[in-house]
Every structure is written in C-alpha cells, then in structure tokens.
Image (spheres, helix red, strand yellow):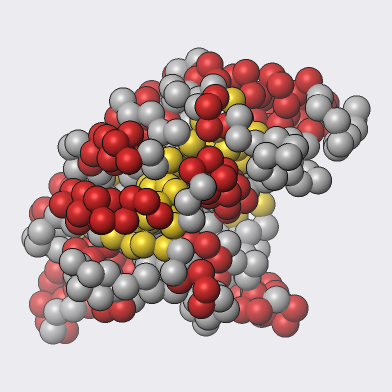
Amino acid sequence: MSHITEKTNAFLERAHKVMPFGVTSNFRWWGKGEGIGVARAEGAYIWDFDGNRYIDYRIGFGPVILGHGHPAVVERVSQAIKNGTVFAFTHELEVKVAERIVQMCPGVDMIRFANSGAEATMHSLRIARSHTGREKIIKFEGNYHGMHDYLLFSTASSPAGALGHRRNPIPSPTTSGIPKALHSLVITLPYNDFEALERTVRQAWGDVAAIIVEPIMGNTAAIMPQPGWLQHIRKLCDEYGIVMIMDEVKTGFRVAPGGAQELFGVTADLVTYAKAMGNGFPIAVIGGKREVMNSVGPGRTAHGGTYCGNVVGTAAADATLEIIAQGHVLKTIEARGKALMKGIHGILTDADITHHILGVPSMFGIAFCEEEPTDYRSWSKADSDLYERIAMALVHRGAVPDPDGREPWFLCAALSEKDVDDTLNYFEDAVKEVMAAQKPAGEAREALSK
Ligand SMILES: Cc1ncc(COP(=O)(O)O)c(C=O)c1O
C-alpha cells in the first residue's frame, strides 16, 4: 500500500505557522503528523496535495448531503450573487426558502435565518427564555449544540469521569473560558434516562425555560433515542410549560426530508437546522410554532445579524431543499448506508470483534463494546483506541470517516455502489491489519496472508 503524503505534510506545516494547530476548528486536529490537507473535492471524494483520493464520510461534519460542488447548487448560487449578496432588506430567496421549510418540516410555522448551527441554538435559547420568563436550560450529556458558552457543558469532549453521579450530574464545562455564572443556568442529564428527566423537571420546572435535545446523538456515535424518549420530553414540556427545542443541525433534511420530527413523529416548539440545508454553504435556521416564534420582534426578543438570510446561503438552500424535497436523494443515501452498515457488521463479526452499529443509514456510528450504548456514559466504555486504529488504517487506504468514533459516518448522494464496495474492501483490509498488529509476529503473518 503506497500512501505518499509529502506535499500534504508540507502544506499542514505551513498551516501550522499561521493558525493554532494548523486548523480552524479544534475538531479538525487529528494529532501531530496526522490529518489531510484538502486540495480539491468533487462529489463523494476529496483529494490531498499529493493527489491521493479519499471517499469522504466526513463531508464537512455532515453538511454536504448532495456531494461536493453539486452543479445545481453551484449554478443557483453563481446566478443569484450576480444580483447582489446582502441587502439589509427582505429578498425573494429568503421568503422562498422559508416557504420550503415550512412546507417540508412538521410543526414549523415560521422561521428566522442564522449562519451557523451555533448561532441558531444560541438564538433558540433566548427565544425560549423570553417566551417563558425562566432562565435554566436542561441539556443532555454527550449532546453538542455549537461553540457558544451557554451549552458547552458535558459534551462528548468532557471526560465521562467528570460528569458526577448519574442521579446527581455535574455540568462539566468542555473548555476553559466559560464564565462561572453560566454554570448555574445549565442542568445536565444522561440521554435516554426517562426517570432522571421526569424527577428533575418535577423539582425544577419553575426555573426551566427549555429542554434542548439532539434527536439522534449526532456527536456521540449516532446513539438513537430509546422508543418514547422524544415523546417523553414532549409530554413533560407540555405539562410544565417548558419550550422543547429539537436541535436538528445534524439530522435536519438528512434523516428524512422533514428531519427527525418527521422520522420520529414528534414536533418540538423550536427547531434548529443548518448543515444539510445548504449542502456546505453556511446557512442556518431557527424555526418553530407560531406562538413561540411570535416572541421574536422589535420590542420583544432580539434576533438579527448582518448576514442572516444572505443571498449566498439562501440560494444554496433553495437549490438543495428543492432536490431533497423530491425524495429520491435520501432514498439513494439510505440504500448505500444500509449496505455499508450490513457490510461493516459482517466484517466485524467475522473478525470476532464485539461491536454495535448505531444510528440510521445516512449517519451511523460504530462502537466496540459489549452493551449497546444508550448515552454518553455507556458509550465512553467503548474501545475508542481500536476504533481509531481501524479508522486510520482505512484513511490510508482511501476512505475517510472521522478517526474519532464520536463523529458518525455521514453519507452523501454522490456516493456510488462501487464506492460502498471499495469502502468495504478497504474496511476488511484495515481490520485485518489492525488485528494482525495486535498478535505475536508469527500469528500476524498468518492472519495477513489469509
Ligand atoms: C447538533 C449540533 N448542533 C449545533 C452544532 C453547531 O453547528 P455549527 O458548527 O454550524 O455552529 C453542531 C455541529 O456539529 C451540531 O452537531
């Protein structure tokens, strides 16, 4: 296997000199001497600076649902920007995309635009606080809602050992730099723990503005909601006048045309979308029920931003959502995802590696552990070193999931049946290589020659 990365490594060193760790997001840092510098991308592939081609299962952490540089999206954006990019007035594309979203997404009567997932969840908190007159937010361990200070607690980047007893969890800040005053505004709870949530809500509801939830744990290996979990949150929110926020930044327009609300048949009061709606162009949305969204407005609740609803993002969303609404794209992705999940399961079973494949075909995770994980605490018992070794062996062969097992595999519509077959062949070889390296020399030679 020849995998030369000389030019790419030189490029990464150059990046290092002008950006901390050579990256523009800590999540992109793979370790010294690791990582890929992207020279170009097309469809389901990225190429590095040495001309190595990789089948891309990160697709920008999820957004590129149609494939890199999708012609219809590029064309719509290119045409639209000839007539200006930002106006500080409402324009046609904003209304058109808003109408599309209201039509596609159950429970969404009105929307406002933002530019990133973090911005959307940040605004959703203010709307919920303003609507209820309460200040605390319940969030779940291992859920991630973006880089703002309000919710960077007990994410999958916080060590599981810092979360406290599960009956009395400690909100564990993911990073230095978060003001202490914010700690008291967050209540963290284990995902899928019906009893803990109910007990907490009954005790604290008078202070609780919102429960924010990822409908599938898109930042912890795509752990699924247990049957009834989202309905349980809905019921408690109804009973106690709490705003239910579904963070669909990863699931929106991916797990179904109407996102997780459609897939699971539960509608929240507020929903946040970003990633897949723009096929990689920066755009996001806060949407929801008319009654709650009507809290937004002059003299009521502040929302705004110079670039909210700009032409580039809305044109991309217009083209992307038009294609997703036709239905065939998500069906193709589902078929490819099912084949991958089945193939990976077979390879790991043959290699005698205890595992669970989590999530849905369009975004799935792999956990090496005995018990199927249902929350971040149980996922953290999985063998993440083994996952990383297999993932890196796969990268060296030409398919790139994130080597960090918390990040699911994301599929795009440009992925072909051949890409799936190639990936499974690479995966089988990668597993053999890693397992052989764990064995004494004689046994290893024998295993590799099979
Ligand atoms: C569920 C969820 N919410 C919010 C965000 C933040 O989105 P962005 O990176 O666009 O700010 C992410 C990012 O991965 C996410 O997965």
Q: Position of residue 98 (x, y in %)?
A: 64, 24
Q: Residue at the spot x=53%, y=57% of the render?
A: 146
Q: Is any atom of residue 308 visible in this view?
A: yes
Q: Position of residue 7 (x, y in %)?
A: 65, 72
The residue depicted at 57 percent of the width and 45 percent of the height is 130
Q: Which quarter of the figure has residue 335?
A: top left
**Residue at image point 85% right, 30% down:** 89
Query: For the N terminus, which image quadrant?
Result: bottom left
| Quadrant containing the C terminus in the rendered view | bottom left
Residue 5 appears left or right of 437: right
Q: Nearer the viewer, residue 356 or 283?
A: 283
Viewer-side residue, 66 vs 122: 122
Is residue 42 rendered to the left or right of residue 408? Answer: right
Number of marks in picture: 0
Q: Is residue 418 above or below residue 158?
A: above
Residue drawn where x is 32% and y is 73% of the image: 170
Q: Where 329 falls versus 15 (above or below)?
A: above
